[in-house]
Amino acid sequence: MEPLLITEKLTKDFGGVRALDNLDLEVREGLIQSVIGPNGAGKTTLFNVISGVIPATSGVVRFNGEIITGLPPHRISNMGTTRTFQNLQLFCDMTVLENVMVGMHMRSAGGFFSSSFRLPWIVAEERRIRDRSIEWLQLVGLEMESEKIAGSLPFGRQRILELARALATDPRLLMLDEPAAGLNLKETQDLAGLIKRISKLDITILLVEHDMDLVMEVSDHVSVMDQGRKIAEGDPETIRNDEAVLKAYLGEE
Ligand SMILES: Nc1ncnc2c1ncn2[C@@H]1O[C@H](COP(=O)(O)OP(=O)(O)OP(=O)(O)O)[C@@H](O)[C@H]1O
Ligand SMILES: [Mg+2]
């Protein structure tokens, strides 16, 4: 079966900096796949190019068999991709539940704002969105905090909320950019369990993460980037013992 996501010779230049350098990557449906690499390797740029927020310099991204390079971000997300951000992006003044409902509105049937005359329909749709959002909060363990203001939650809970909001778009592919950043050990272990539960919902996961324990625990497959290139890939055990990987992380030979 063709992989859900493919990048072919994907390249991104920022002036003189080649952030992605002829990157070939395949993400197979149903797996938890990780991309690791030192700071500046190009991991976030990869997410930015896949999701269409910045254009590729050259190369192609395919999702579900279709070329998506060059499409606007909302088209790419409507096809079933979503992502979280390395720096939290929440509506801090809104409640936890409202933040998740916003995620769902992004995917709900067109015309939500189209007419104030079809009131019963809108009420029913609003209720459906609310109920479904509560289910997502239950999945991530935030349902008790649903009426709290998002900005008042501890940092670790805000990260989980961002994840719930991403899930509320009902993605086929979920891209997580350093979800464990700033989490303590317990929170990181909980996150590992949550990522595995999400995977069981038939959501393919592409994980960018510096926490190697987390990567090694949850990943089916790991790709290693350095300076925009893929320098190794394989199962977690292979990667753990790979010379090139050790070199990239330790800096010098
Ligand atoms: N918008 C931009 N303009 C110019 N250069 C950029 C831009 N975004 C990224 N870069 C450069 O591209 C390279 C890759 O950056 P990127 O943020 O993708 O790395 P990363 O692997 O996500 O690193 P980190 O682990 O620190 O998050 C870096 O040299 C960075 O400075
Ligand atoms: Mg990054």
Image (tube, rainbow, N blue to C red):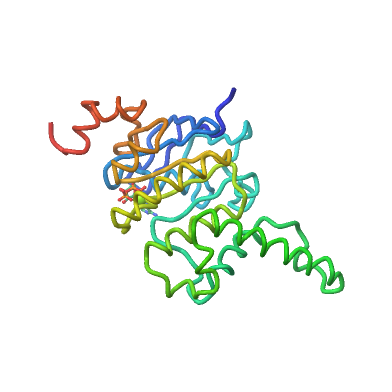
The C terminus - image quarter: top left
Q: Is residue 158 left or right of residue 252?
A: right
Location of residue 225 by image quarter: top left
Q: Is residue 216 left or right of residue 149?
A: left
Residue occupying the far left of the picture: 253
Instruction: In this rendered view, identify the residue nearer to me: 12 or 122.
Output: 122
The N terminus - image quarter: top right
- Against 99, residue 69 (above or below) is above
Q: Is residue 115 left or right of residue 12?
A: right
Q: Is residue 239 left or right of residue 52?
A: left
Disc tally is 0
Query: In the image, residue 71 lies at what x, y percent?
Result: 61, 46
Location of residue 154 by image quarter: bottom left
- Against 10, residue 143 (above or below) is below
Q: Residue visible at 29% across and 29% down?
A: 239
- Against 82, residue 244 (above or below) is above
Residue occupying the far front of the picture: 144
Location of residue 114 by image quarter: bottom right
Q: Residue visible at 51% across and 52% down?
A: 53
Query: In the image, residue 179 lies at what x, y percent?
Result: 39, 52
Q: Residue visible at 34% across and 40% down?
A: 215
Query: In the image, residue 213 lies at what x, y percent?
Result: 29, 41
Q: Residue visible at 57% across and 41% down?
A: 201
Instruction: In this rendered view, identify the residue nearer to me: 121 or 228.
Output: 121
Residue occupying the far top of the picture: 1
Query: In the image, residue 31 lies at what x, y percent?
Result: 49, 33
